[in-house]
Amino acid sequence: MNTPVPVSFEFFPPKTEVGYEKLLKAHDELKVANPEFFSVTYGAGGSTQERTIETVIELNRRGVPAAPHLSCIGSTKETVHALLTRYKEAGIKRIVALRGDLPSGMMGTGGDFNFASDLVRYVKAEFGDDFAIEVAAYPEMHPQAANLDKDIDHFVAKAKEGADSAITQYFYNVSAYKHFVDEVRKRGCDIEIVPGIMPITNYSNLARFSDACGADIPRWMRKALETCGDDVQRIRSIGLNFVVDLCNELIAAGAPKLHFYSMNQSGPTLAILEKLNK
Ligand code: FAD
């Protein structure tokens, strides 16, 4: 399949064997779009972390580069070093470096890192250019930031620690992306800022999740999706058109690549890619 710009796809670590088999199937189906890489998110605790590690190593073994997300909050330098060494030995060449969020109720960090910039600096110092480093960007502002200007300053500082490229939180306002990129460039930072794209398949889940992560669903989109009620097919069809338009507008605005939050499914993402202006 031809895509107008290079693409990458994100998975989350499945909790069950059935989920894992579904992920591998989605992975094999998404390969048709010749992705630059697949990434796998990293949770705050215990067993899902090991799932991320196993999944990303297996995906990488299957041919297309795979990149683990790595959140540093609450971690020590020793544990991060050990994990990165394991990734390096498995042939992993890219990571998504994040602060992450402490589980609610946990006070302080109890670790060696306060912000993603601390992790980027540490990885560069210890591993040089062994890993390409992706960082997170928030065109509509990180929910905990004091204000948008400060958040962009922090983003630029993080990029200047040695990040190679950034992936954004998903958003549906193209102008927010354009403003963010302009402001970053004004601050003398030229790393690629790749829009994160969330396909729309289930309106109530999307609304809940968007509230939590600070992504705005424009009123006109909300109203259109709300009128679909429980008609899943209609939500998918309207949502598909919205997201195809969004991607085409982003590419026209200069987005260098697209990163899709696949939700471990191939269908919704491939449907978007099929309809993009080639
Ligand atoms: P940072 O860049 O450290 O920023 C966090 C906040 O601190 C911002 O408000 C920033 O303005 C502020 N800040 C930064 N530096 C300073 C400073 N020096 N002084 C004061 N304030 C500062 N979460 C997971 O748990 N697992 C994942 O796999 C995961 N993957 C993600 C992938 C992408 C593409 C994105 C966009 C987000 C992802 N997240 C993930 C969510 C992310 O962990 C949270 O949004 C988290 O709250 C912030 O992480 P960050 O790396 O953006 O933090």
Image: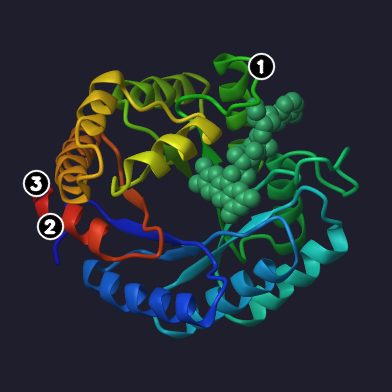
Q: For residue 245, what is the image quadrant?
A: top left
Q: Which mark is residue 146?
A: 1
Q: Is residue 200 above or below residue 10?
A: above
Rendered-image quadrant of the N terminus: bottom left
Vertical side of 71 occupied by 1: above or below: below
| Sequence-first tag of 2 and 1 | 1
Which image quadrant for residue 256? top left
Front label number (3 vs 1): 1
| Any part of residue 162 in sight | no
Residue 194 falls left or right of residue 159: left
- Residue ID for mark 3: 277
Between residue 130 and residue 2, name the one nearer to us: 2
State how far apart marks 2 and 1 are (Cα): 40 Å
Q: Secondary structure at mark 1?
A: loop
- For marks 2 and 3, give the one nearer the viewer: 2
Within 10 Å of disc 1 (Cα), the crowding (few <14, some 14-19, many 20+) is few
* Three-letter residue code for mark 2: Glu
Q: How many residues crowd mark 2 within 10 Å: few (<14), some (14–19), many (20+)?
A: some
Residue under the point 30% across and 48% down = 199
Residue 196 coordinates in the image, percent (x, y): 39, 44
The residue located at (78%, 62%) in the rendering is 80
| Callout 1: CB less than 8 Å from ligand 1 | yes
Q: What amino acid does circle 1 point to?
A: Ala
Query: Of 195 and 85, which appears nearest the observer?
Result: 195
Pointer 3: residues within 10 angstroms few (<14), some, or many (20+)?
Answer: few
Res 10 → quadrant:
bottom left
Find the distance from the CA under tag 2 to the CA under tag 3.
9 Å
Q: Disc 2 marks which residue? A: 274
Q: Is the residue under label 1 in contact with that under label 2 (CB below 8 Å)? A: no
